[in-house]
Image (cartoon, grey):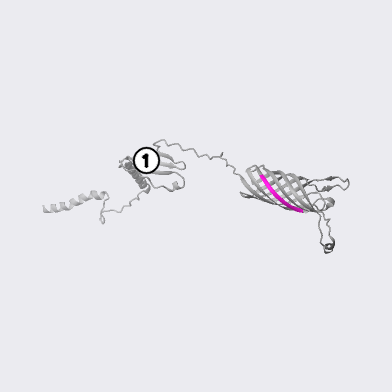
Amino acid sequence: MRRWLLSASFLIPLTLSAPAFADGDCPPGSWFCEDVEVPKPNLDDADDQADDAGTQAQGDAQVAPKKKKKKKKAAQSDADAAGQAVVVQGQEGGETVIIVRQQPGQRVVVVGPDGQPAAEPPPEPPPAVPRTNKKKRWRERFGLNLRLEAAAFAGRNDNGAGLGGIGASFRWRPSPYFALDVGTDLMGGVDYNGDDRVELSGALSGIVYFNPGDVVQIYGIGGIFASHAEVDDGLGYCDGYYCGYGYGYSNSTGRDYVGADAGLGVEFRLSRHFGLSIDGLALIRQKVDDSPPEFVDAATGETTDTSAAGLFRAGLNFWW
């Protein structure tokens, strides 16, 4: 009996451990475990299972009630500085609210949890229309013209007749299309008869600008003038003793004229206050003093005190 009990106590543990060995749960170092090749797990199936688990966890997180929090604005993103859309996300009453601001115009779109607009977005304001009908009021201007000039006219016996000189005038421009010019000129040279002449004149002219808004402005000029000339005919005389020393008296005659001129010119506006001008005028004048006739036709003996010439001027204009 004692021997049977010992045998039974030895067989019972072996019998209980057999199912465990059959299932493959062998403890380390066991003699009755067979070496079996274990297949490697499929990583793709593992990733799919992990994605399914993450999706399910995210759904559970959305279903779970959220605590009531105060509405918080996210930090302004770099897109706001670039003038693009700005998204501000927060919570209000347990409901997710997304506000989208679009630049420019600050358009606001409220989006609910389902991704759809929760409210009708306000219309964008109309773009600002620049005012194109605003006109600048003209302000009267004053100017100073400094010029060089030359007069050309016919001469008797090709004596090289011609005058040259300088001039200056003050201009008042009350309108962009019109200016009043008051000026004076000093010229000298050889006249029609070959006599030396110095002449001083004063003129009152009107200037009409045809395209006052352009950089290159074309204008017409015309007016009236008066002048006084001192003419030396070269028929001087000497008196006795002084003739031998080269001293004598010149036969200088004074002449007075009135006349009119008209012409065209162009002004190059280099800046608001400075420009260059070139013009040409035709003038006609009449001697009005009681001196002998100025022009005598040697062939017929006819005389006249009327003369004409061309005047060319180039100057600097200063405006303020």
Please state which of residues 38 and 172 is positioned toward the viewer in this rendering: 172
x%, y% of residue 252?
80, 54
- The number of numbered badges drawn on the structure is 1
Q: Identify the amino acid type marked 1.
A: Val
Q: Is 51 on the left or on the right of 250, as rendered?
A: left
Q: In the image shown, does 279 or 204 lie closer to the viewer? A: 204
| Residue positioned 76% across, 48% down in the render | 256
**Does residue 172 appear in this view?**
yes
Instruction: Say above or below: 107 vs 147.
Output: above
Say left or right for 24 vs 224.
left
Furthest residue in direction left, as rendered: 1
For numbered disc 1, what is the local secondary structure?
strand
Residue 230 point in image, percent of width and height: 77, 52
Residues rendered magenta in the picture:
180-188
Q: Nearer the viewer, residue 275 or 214?
A: 275
| Position in image of residue 47 (x %, y %) | 36, 47
Query: Is residue 182 found inside the magenta-colored segment of the image?
Result: yes
Q: Which residue is mark 1?
A: 97
Looking at the picture, how far across and down is residue 21, in whole percent? Answer: 25, 50
- Furthest residue toward bottom: 245
Please indicate, yes or no, whether residue 213 appears anywhere in the rendered image.
no
Could you tell me what secondary structure mostly forms the magenta stretch?
A: strand
Callout 1 environment at 10 Å: few (<14), some (14 to 19), or many (20+)?
A: many
Residue at x-position 20% and y-position 49%: 16
Residue 44 forms part of the magenta stretch: no
Residue that sits furthest to the top in the current view: 120
| Side of 82 relative to 209 (left or right) | left
Residue at the extreme right = 299
| Residue at position x 61%, y 46% in the image | 141
